[in-house]
Amino acid sequence: MKVQSNLRFQHKYQEIIVFAVIFVVFAVGNFLGLTDLFRNLTQRAIQPLLNVEVSLLSQFRNPYESAVLVYTKSEYVAQLESQYAQALTQLAELQQLRSENKELRRMLNTTERSGSQKVIVGVPIVSLASPAVGVGMVDGVELGQMVLVDGILVGTITDVSQHQSKVLLLTQVGEKRVIAQTESGVEGILMGDGKNVLLTQVPRSAEIQEGELVLTSGQEGIQRGVAVGVVRSISSDPADASQTLQISQLISFYEAVLVEIR
Amino acid sequence: MILLGKIIQLLAKMIVLLLVVTFEFTVGHPVLFITLIVSFLLTARPLSRYALFIVAVWIFSSVYDISIFISFGVIAGMYFGFKYTSQYLESNIRRFFIYLLFSLSVIHFSVQVPISFWSMFYLGSALLISFIFLVKFLFANYGFLGTKMQSKYTFFR
């Protein structure tokens, strides 16, 4: 028993010594730089084996990775859809801005104004009950100013608040009376019947052609020569001393992108 | 003839070790490599044992691209730790797994094995395979390649 124990003890230390010698050999080799050299050679030698194993493993992984890829792609598509919806909104905003810009350019190019005249441009607030524009006192809007669309008079400012102004359209029935005249110089008073613009109080004796241009005559707050529309039809009651002209404005406040306040 | 057979057996073990370690390098942690080398060292005769040890240290260091001293420390520590600390922890399997997990943690931090689904999946699978291998071959009555185990302890003790 004791002999066996001694043998095991001897064997244990013999093993430890051999391992220590191996360690010293490795340490010396490392110190001399031989381990790096041989390791590089070994790595180069086993590289083909590694490549084969990697390709085998990639084939094994493919079904799983395809499933993962499908899942991540579906998430990606959902993200793209969300971004697409946002982009559509931005595009709509950009188109709105583009049309506003185009309108502004056209206004600046086509409207006659003196150099010192301030141009106020507002967005029409489309309300059938009370049409308004999105500019007010802070923008310099004053009571009685003209509201134009494409250079054509469509109404006047009747109430001004800080950031908004009410507009009385020429088509509306209201107190504001604008004096206008045809190209041939026949004057009348612009009135609205709730739907159309009418040039009333035109002398019965005046000869007017359909299609004639109607312009403002000029009064307080209203410049002279601002287009109102063209004569669409003439109606005259034999019992009446005057005749009424229906004016076609060709544009609409409700369809305008921007309006000019002058 | 017997010598030739032993040499062939030794070469076969070395090739198995090389294949296993290169495979494990592509998937993550060298669980099976450590299990195999320790079982080979435990069951081999002295000369084969030293040859296997040197080759194992060398290929492990080369494949995982770690310092030769870490490779030496992990394999020698695993082998000596398992073999000579049975008086502190009798259960072979517990002792083996304690040293194995310690070695794996050293390797994990030395090599920076990426933690991914696949590396963790492989780690779990390899530990299971290692457990089955140890139960079936190393710590049962007969060791790997039919070598008779010297240990009189049963597996779960």
Image: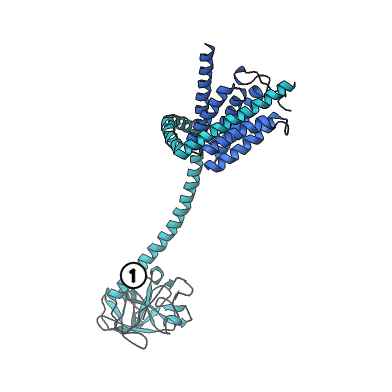
Give the residue displayed 43% in from the left and 33% down from the top.
Answer: A38
Percent of width and height locating residue A201: 35, 84
Q: Residue at x 37, y 86 (%)?
A: A221
Three-letter amino acid code of the residue under disc 1: Glu
Locate residue B111, reporting x and y percent.
52, 41
Query: Regarding mark 1 in the picture, which secondary structure is present there?
Result: helix
Q: Is residue A89 visible?
A: yes
Q: Residue furthest top?
A: B1
Label 1, on which residue? A103
Q: What's the colour of chain A in the image?
A: cyan
Residue B118 in sight: no
> Observer-nearest residue: B124 or A123?
B124
Position of A256 relative to B77 (above/below): below
How dense is the environment of label 1, judged by Cα within 10 Å: few (below 14), some, or many (20 and up)?
Answer: some
Residue A230: image location, x then y, percent: 30, 74
Q: Nearer the viewer, residue B154 or B54?
A: B54
Q: B37 or A50, which lies in front?
A: B37
Q: Using the rendered view, name the quadrant where residue B139 is placed.
A: top right
Q: Chain of mark 1?
A: A
**The chain in blue:** B
User: Does residue A79 appear to the left or right of B146 in the view shown?
Assistant: left
Residue at (52, 27) in percent of width and height = B17
* Quarter of the rendering containing residue A95: bottom left
> Where the C terminus of chain B falls, by quadrant?
top right
Number of numbered markers: 1
In the rendered image, which quarter is residue A109 located in?
A: bottom left
